[in-house]
Amino acid sequence: MSAYTKDNKVTHAGVAVNNWAGDFDCSVCHRKRLTASEFSKKMQEKKRRGEGGLKCKPCVEKAAQAERDAAAAKAAAAPAAPAAGAPAAAAATQVCSACERALPESSFTKPQLKKGPAKQRCQPCIAAADRGEADAADAKKAAALAEAKKAVKIAEATGSAAQKLKANAQLAALEGELVTGLKPMVIGRGRRGSGGRGRGRGRGRA
Ligand SMILES: [Zn+2]
Ligand SMILES: [Zn+2]
């Protein structure tokens, strides 16, 4: 909870955001009322489709790590030289299209192997890409939030009441998105035009 929203009694879509909590539950660690920012885009979409079995980012990462560990352990346990009469073992190496390493088949998920040598990626590469995507998305959100906060500061210092309201509303919308995972447009609670205090998008008003 930022001091800013507390001090300014910011509301989002007419709902006070003080002490807000999200409505995301993790099916693995069973933490409840988490905010959307604890979940990947993929999981947020899953929730939007009404599916259960959501996993928070730490739980997804933990599972991926466990899978990598298991794959590594399996690879280590595999006999170094294929036993005679077991030609399958020799063929059980796959080349990752991303890092171009020849790795034991156990380093790949079945869906990846189905994509074929031109597209398949090993588990470490997929994990790295997932992390990169999540980091980029987080950085983008943080930047947008910082930008909105700056706009509020400027508006508070020099702007008209309408400009202040607009800047505050934009900031609240961004913070709301972090909690709900929803863009503000999607939220519309059927109260459009009722002009609740602090909704502040200024539509339908003089
Ligand atoms: Zn979890
Ligand atoms: Zn790879």
Image (spheres, rainbow, N blue to C red):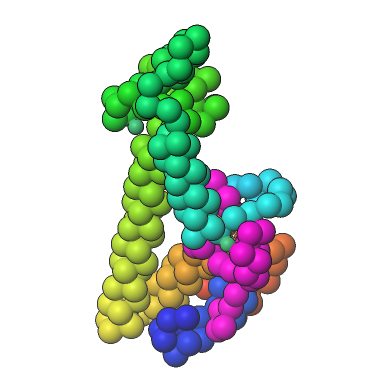
**How far from the left and from the top, in percent, is residue 159?**
32, 79
> Magenta span covers which residues?
17-44
**How far from the left and from the top, in percent, is residue 200?**
52, 73
When asked about the image quadrant of residue 164, the answer is bottom left
Residue visible at 51% across and 31% down in the picture: 109
**How far from the left and from the top, in percent, is residue 66?**
49, 50
Farthest residue, direction bottom: 7
Looking at this view, is 128 or 103 the one in front?
A: 103
Looking at this view, is 38 or 163 the one in front?
A: 38
Residue visible at 41% across and 15% down in the picture: 90
Q: Answer with left or right where residue 96 lies relative to residue 105.
A: left
Residue visible at 34% across and 73% down in the picture: 149
Residue visible at 45% across and 17% down in the picture: 83
When asked about the image quadrant of residue 129, the answer is top left
**Vertical position of residue 93 compared to residue 191: above or below:** above
Report the number of numbered marks: 0
Ligand 1 shown in quarter: bottom right
**Vertical position of residue 12 compared to residue 112: above or below:** below
**Vertical position of residue 78 compared to residue 69: above or below:** above
Visible residue check, residue 162: no
Q: Main secondary structure of the magenta part?
A: loop
**Vertical position of residue 162 compared to residue 57: above or below:** below
Visible residue check, residue 72: yes
When asked about the image quadrant of residue 54, the answer is bottom right
Q: Is residue 24 magenta?
A: yes
Q: Is residue 160 magenta?
A: no
Looking at this view, is 27 or 158 the one in front?
A: 27
Farthest residue, direction front: 84
